[in-house]
């Protein structure tokens, strides 16, 4: 009996379906590849290069050149291996902008079937951007997108060039000044995003970059329309945030100026095309405001309001408030940025500011107290004019300190030749009822005149003096010593009378004992100027001789000089 053959139609149908699926998948993979190959055979991407270069050149008013173009069907873009935007001839021949790769997103259907180029986006990879500021304040990018004047009108127009999105990835921007300097400002890892870009309308943007010294900057806002006469005068509204800013390392401040800090910035900047208004806050740590100063031990907040003129390259500081806690010192004035050396004319005003709140600021402005002493209580008032540049300026004005105490330093015990025999005692706290002076500070040092101070333990002191750039003191005062007792009081009174008739040079016409202050602020030396009195009254002393010294007790009062003693000048 022949064998029975069993057929399973379902299995045969299933195998056919599997084959169909495989064929479908193969077709799905092959057809795009075949299409891409066919497009490459019939579409030469380089034929679009002249048109793209021409449109970009017209839009930017600069010669734009592209490298070889290739078509990426999968990403829907034309890819150029090189991009270069020419420099304004007034700033040199080095290209203003270069990049190794440019991706131009295009609409594929019009490109393939109609040879029509419709640009959707630009993506620029690792560009190098060279920004230059001339001595007259103009920038090399100011002539970008210059329109051409119409024959019938005096207005400039631009051929609009709308693009959906423009992105820059991992760029590098260098900012230099003419004449070229050693340390240009460098922004690395630059990322830029321009959405709905148009030359004729405003558009949103975001920018982020790295600064030397681990700083980070982020900017966002709106910009445009592009000013066809001066791109640097284009209107914008932006919020700027900078973290871990070191202005010296970043190249904003000359190291020789002596100003430094590490901090953050949060500022709102608005430009109407003529003036730029900036209103923001700076949080500063390790702040130094004067060459020779030490970093402030506590952070400071600086709030400022500035209006800058794009035409005059200068501006007005409406207010700059240096704040710590409830204490604020205000600066107002003007500045000028011509010739790449910013100069300013500012006024500093402090009105009855509590001294306790200023302790952290004193090191930053170079104020030094002896033996880690501190001032407690009382107020400071100051009025100074500051003119010049950060590197070379003149500070002129006056200050007044009222009702404070120098804690941690025994002034009375350190006055050589007077306190030890005259009974002047202050303990470890010296009370200062008032201390005021006129001052002039330059890079050659400081000069104090019209010094007037009242210390209950010592009396009134008047005079003048100087501080050298290295910190050496040279002060000449006349003190009315009112706390001497007994025989020592007789000696003090005699010296006071002797000084009033002395032929020697005196710092003022006030009566009292002449005192010299030398050494440094950290280790001052205060001595009575007995030699000056002796030289000025040589004839009188020779006639009276030892009898005067014995009778008045001067031999005891001004004994052997102790050069190791020191104290602080009251300025």
Image (cartoon, rainbow, N blue to C red):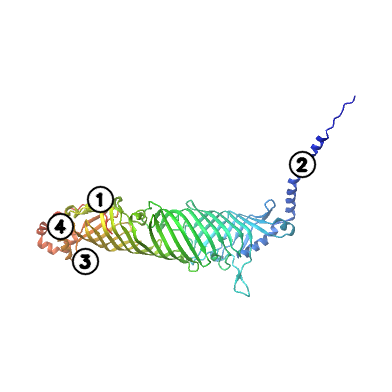
Element type where label 2 sits in the image: helix
Residue 451 shows up from this direction: yes
> Which numbered disc, 1 or 4, marks the residue that appears first in the sequence?
1
The span from disc 2 to disc 3 (Cα, nearest Å) is 113 Å
Name the residue furthest bottom.
Answer: 152
The span from disc 3 to disc 1 (Cα, nearest Å) is 32 Å
Image marks 4 and 2: residues in contact by CB distance under 8 Å? no
Image marks 2 and 1: residues in contact by CB distance under 8 Å? no
Instruction: Between residue 309 and residue 390, name the one nearer to us.
Output: 309
Query: Which residue position is annotated with label 2?
Result: 21
Element type where label 4 sits in the image: helix
Q: Which residue is at 63% across, 63% downward?
A: 57
Query: Which residue position is annotated with label 3?
Result: 509
> Which numbered disc, 4 or 2, marks the residue that appears first in the sequence?
2
Name the residue furthest top.
Answer: 1
Residue 391 location (% of width, % of height): 40, 61
Name the quarter where the C terminus is drawn: bottom left
The span from disc 4 to disc 2 (Cα, nearest Å) is 119 Å
């Amino acid at each position: 009996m022949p064998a029975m053959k069993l057929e399973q139609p379902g299995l045969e149908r299933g195998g056919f379906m599997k084959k169909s699926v495989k064929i479908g998948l193969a077709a799905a993979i092959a057809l795009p590849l075949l299409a891409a190959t066919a497009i490459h055979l019939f579409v030469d991407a380089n034929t679009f290069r002249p048109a793209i270069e021409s449109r970009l050149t017209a839009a930017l008013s600069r010669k734009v050149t592209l490298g070889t173009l290739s078509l990426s069907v999968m990403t829907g873009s034309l890819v150029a291996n090189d991009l270069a935007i020419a420099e304004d001839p007034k700033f040199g021949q080095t290209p203003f902008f270069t990049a190794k790769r440019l991706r131009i997103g295009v609409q594929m259907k019009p490109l393939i079937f109609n040879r029509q180029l419709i640009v959707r986006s630009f993506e620029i990879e690792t560009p190098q951007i060279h920004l230059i500021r001339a001595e007259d304040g103009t920038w090399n990018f100011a002539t970008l997108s210059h329109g051409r004047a119409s024959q019938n009108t005096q207005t400039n127009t631009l051929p609009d060039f709308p693009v959906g999105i423009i992105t820059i990835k991992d760029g590098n921007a260098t900012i230099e000044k003419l004449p070229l300097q050693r340390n240009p400002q460098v922004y690395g890892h630059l990322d830029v995003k321009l959405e709905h870009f148009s030359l004729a309308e405003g558009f949103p943007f975001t920018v982020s970059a790295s600064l030397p010294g681990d700083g980070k900057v982020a900017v966002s806002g709106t910009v445009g329309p592009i000013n066809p006469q001066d791109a640097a005068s284009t209107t914008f509204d932006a919020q700027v945030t900078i973290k871990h800013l070191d202005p010296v390392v970043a190249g904003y401040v000359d190291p020789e100026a002596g100003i430094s800090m590490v901090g953050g910035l949060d500022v709102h900047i608005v430009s109407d095309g003529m003036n730029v208004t900036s209103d923001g806050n700076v949080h500063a740590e390790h702040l130094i405001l004067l060459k020779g100063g030490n970093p402030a031990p506590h952070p400071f907040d600086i709030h400022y309001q500035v209006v800058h003129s794009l035409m005059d390259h200068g501006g007005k500081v409406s207010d700059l408030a240096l704040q710590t806690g409830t204490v604020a010192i205000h600066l107002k004035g003007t500045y000028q940025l011509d010739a790449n050396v910013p100069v300013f004319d500012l006024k500093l005003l402090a009105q009855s500011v509590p001294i306790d709140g200023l302790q952290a600021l004193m090191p930053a402005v170079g104020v030094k107290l002896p033996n880690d002493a501190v001032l407690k209580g009382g107020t400071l008032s100051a009025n100074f004019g500051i003119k010049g540049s950060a590197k070379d300026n003149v500070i002129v004005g006056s200050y007044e300190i009222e009702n404070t105490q120098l804690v941690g330093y025994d002034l009375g015990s350190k006055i050589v030749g007077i306190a030890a025999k005259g009974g002047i005692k202050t303990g470890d706290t010296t009370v200062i009822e008032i201390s005021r002076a006129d001052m002039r500070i330059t890079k050659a040092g400081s000069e104090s005149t019209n010094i007037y101070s009242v210390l209950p333990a010592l009396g009134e002191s008047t005079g003048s003096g100087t501080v050298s750039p290295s910190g050496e003191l040279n002060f000449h005062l006349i003190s009315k010593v009112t706390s001497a007792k007994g025989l020592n009081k007789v000696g003090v009174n005699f010296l006071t009378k002797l000084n009033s008739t002395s032929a020697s040079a005196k710092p003022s016409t006030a009566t009292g004992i002449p005192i010299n202050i030398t050494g440094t602020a950290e280790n001052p030396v205060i001595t009575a100027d007995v030699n000056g009195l002796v030289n000025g009254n040589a004839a009188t002393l020779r006639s009276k001789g030892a009898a005067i010294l014995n009778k008045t007790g001067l031999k005891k009062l001004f004994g052997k000089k102790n050069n190791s003693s020191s104290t602080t000048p009251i300025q």
